[in-house]
Image: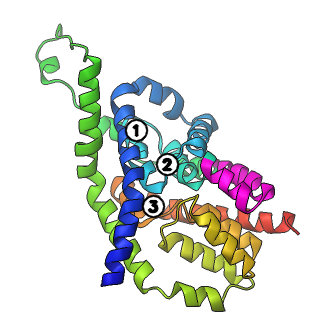
Amino acid sequence: MEQFTHIFLHYLKEVIPALALGFFISGFVHEFIPEDLVLKYLGKSGIKPIFYSTLIGTFLPVCCWGSLPIAISFYKKGAKLGPVLAFLVATPATSISALLVVYSVLGLQFAVYIFFAVIIMGITIGLIGNSIKVESRRTQENITCPHCDMKSEHTHQQKTTAQKLVSALKYAFIELPKEIGLELFIGLILAAVVSTFLPVGKLIKNYLGGWFGYVFSIVFGIVMYLCSTASVPLVDSLMKQGMNVGACMTLLLIGPVTSYGTILVLKKEYGLKVLTVFLASLIVTSLILGLGFQIISR
């Protein structure tokens, strides 16, 4: 129990700054970015909104926990499922700081490949997401002023900047945590339980060789909480112990994207069907891209 508490507090300490940043950005999106702008760039069908969402996510320094509230805000503003899923893939998978660490530890080939692999993965999963029919949250949660139903000549007063800031902070740190806070908390507990009781060290020592490395990367990447920067030294140590370079790439791609919080929040907001398609697409694309890296690295 002492080890579980230690690991849980370690995760909590690591996640809270990212969540705080994610919630703050989501509040900013909710209050300061007009719905028309979101609909213009992320609310249409086709590859362009997915590309925008993927590119934004690639450079944004936010982990999978911090990307969740931002993605939910885009969703509520009217963004389609494809760009939202692309954002949830690209944002935690890499960032400028993560790419610099990859370049420093693993080399230029790894860094360049990851950058383009994340873009390919985000666009692919985004296109798959757009093929799934889901009901827009914008129409469900677009609350109109009660006066508008009574008087057609009623007009709204524009909020001042101070009022908008207060509203943004209220949404970011009160309303949104109420909606997805429980799922995030449960996700942290599950991550701590797995880290405490799963014999990862023994598994790595005995079964790293061959094609099992890909299976290990998928399972380990999904069940463990990894961030794009912190996962680099781990992958470097695995590779030095003889793990397949393609499997290492797969772990770098899938590990930072998934967390128990991501899984629980996606299921709550979109349902089991979307979650299943998201995970299946993520597994397949990360495996293909990992195999591709193995081929070009020979």
What residue is shown with label 2? 62
Is residue 20 placed above or below 5 in the rendered structure? Answer: above
Q: Nearer the viewer, mark 1 or mark 3?
A: 1
State the SS at label 3: helix
Q: Residue at x 32, y 35 (%)?
A: 139
> What's the residue type where badge 2 is placed?
Val
> What is the residue that sits farthest to the right in this orientation?
298
- Give percent across and percent down for residue 82: 53, 45
Ranked by sequence position, the earlier of labels 1 and 3 is: 1
- What is the distance, in whole Å, between disc 2 and disc 1 at their CAs? 10 Å
State the SS at label 1: helix
Which segment is the magenta one?
Answer: 97-123
Residue 192 visible in the shown view = yes
> What's the residue type where badge 1 is placed?
Ile
Question: Callout 3: 10 Å neighbours few (<14), some, many (20+)?
Answer: some
Magenta segment includes 103: yes
Q: Nearer the viewer, residue 172 or 138?
A: 172
